[in-house]
Image: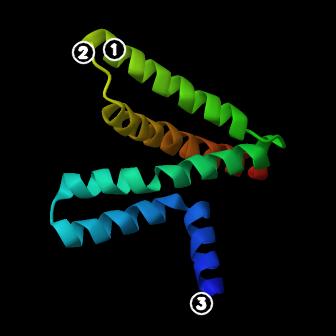
Amino acid sequence: MGDMIIYLLAVFLTIPILATGLVYGISKRITGKHWKSVHRAVNWTTILYIITVSLQLSILFDRPYPGIILIVLLSLLACIVIIQWKTQTEIVFTKALKLLVRISFLLFFGLYIVLGVIGILLEVF
């Protein structure tokens, strides 16, 4: 049973799109609402994309990148908080964190695709 969980986690870290689809499908069956299911899938699988991009960068360029990724995430959060402070004069950290998660999903999903294509091209050529 423990091996099954490890293999499942390895598959989801290798191909996080499967985890996103699985979370979306389960949430869609439970709630019946499309957008709520999309938001849940994004919220729950963003961390998989962050970890996968970190691993892809490490494999492609032979250097560890978690520190740089952490700096990027903290910088994004700082920008979101500053914009929220300037526009609304009140900072609501739950809104800032939700926005950070959604922006991170888009950023790291795009990076996942780009790094996957780069990895394939490097292996072919």
Left or right: 32 in relation to 61? left
Q: Amino acid at mark 3?
A: Met
Let me know if residue 125 appears in the view.
no
Check disc 3 and report its element: helix, strand or loop.
loop
Q: Viewer-nearest of labels 3 and 1?
A: 1
Residue topped by disc 2: 88
In primary-sequence order, the first of circles 2 and 3 is 3
For the residues bearing labels 2 and 3, Cβ distance under 8 angstroms: no
Q: Quadrant of residue 81?
A: top left
Left or right: 1 in relation to 86? right
Indicate the position of residue 21 as horizontal and vertical percent values: 38, 64
Q: CA distance from mark 3 to mark 1?
A: 49 Å
Residue 2, above or below 30 = below
Mark 1 neighbour density, 10 Å: few (under 14) some (14–19) many (20 or more): few
Indicate the position of residue 73 as horizontal and vertical percent values: 55, 32
* Towards the viewer: 78 or 12: 78
Check disc 2 and report its element: helix, strand or loop.
helix
For the residues bearing labels 1 and 2, Cβ distance under 8 angstroms: yes
Numbered tag placed on residue 85 in the rendering: 1
Indicate the position of residue 49 as horizontal and vertical percent values: 54, 50
Q: Residue at (70%, 40%) from the top-left corner?
A: 66
Numbered tag placed on residue 1 in the rendering: 3
Let me know if residue 63 appears in the view.
yes
* Towards the viewer: 78 or 56: 78
Q: Amino acid at mark 2?
A: Gln
Q: CA distance from mark 2 to mark 3?
A: 50 Å
Q: CA distance from mark 1 to mark 2?
A: 6 Å
Check disc 1 and report its element: helix, strand or loop.
helix
Q: Quadrant of residue 1?
A: bottom right
* Towards the viewer: 89 or 101: 89
